[in-house]
Amino acid sequence: MAAPMNPPSPCRSDVMIQAEAVEKWYPNGFQALRGASLTVNRGEVVVIMGPSGSGKSTFIRTFNALEDFQKGSITVDGIALSNDVRNIDAIRREVGMVFQQFNLFPHLTVLENLTLAPVLVRKRPRAEVELQARALLERVGIAEQAEKFPGQLSGGQQQRVAIARALCMEPRVLLFDEPTSSLDPEMVREVLDVIQALAADDITMVVVTHEVRFARQVAHRVVLMDQGEVVEEAEPETFFTAPRHERTQRFLEQIL
């Protein structure tokens, strides 16, 4: 029997995510992604915008194999995403994700939600992880909620728990899938403020959102997707004031 191979090691470069000509079909024949390509550099914040059903969420979910794809290629921190389970596991250890619906374990306390994966997956000492978790809860402004259950928190507080939980795994990349879409308007700002503070720490982030103010203030680049394609990408000032593509112009007329 051949000796087991070591898991792939990340390759240090300026590029964190390289997605090239990604295509995805669902079993019913619907094509969700049509040759979508995107490069995300280390420490960069990229905001993806677009109409409902444009493939935004599907695209970022391919970055950590939550969605499969049939054509194209994706590399995350030098690791090629493939059917090899070792590669998928290696990428998922380095890519954190914050969902629309929080996805917290309702039967676990806030602190237990944060410590579960680092202890079980990364095999870190519980006491060490708890110290880190409490520090992260302090960082996102809800240290006093550590012993409560998710159902006892507001939506904005639950989303901040979800962000702290992702950070507890010490990811190289954070993906946000419309993190404020399930929140009441008054809670949106508090969550965006937390994400903006993370951006100042040079964490690589890809954020699917319709929050124009956030995109203007935080993004290095803004991307428009439509019908499964990347239509346009530019720095925020150019994207919002001088878009090149007619489809981008029509989209901005609807949201500005």
Image: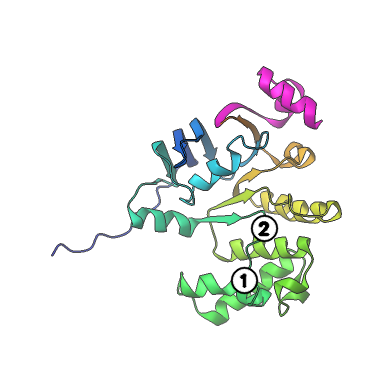
Q: Quadrant of residue 116?
A: bottom right
Amino acid of disc 1: Phe
* Label 1 packing within 10 angstroms: few (<14), some (14-19), many (20+): some
Specify the segment rendered in magenta.
Answer: 228-256
Query: Which residue is located at x 40 percent, y 45 percent?
Result: 78
Question: Was residue 252 drawn as part of the magenta stretch in this picture?
Answer: yes
**Quadrant of the frame with the N terminus:** bottom left
Which residue bears the numbered disc 2?
101
Question: Was residue 207 drawn as part of the magenta stretch in this picture?
Answer: no
Q: Quadrant of residue 213?
A: top right
Give how far across and how far down residue 252 sits, in percent.
Answer: 75, 27
Mark 1 in CB contact with mark 2 (< 8 angstroms): no
Q: Secondary structure at mark 1?
A: loop
* Label 2 packing within 10 angstroms: few (<14), some (14-19), many (20+): some
Which residue bears the numbered disc 1?
105
Amino acid of disc 2: Gln
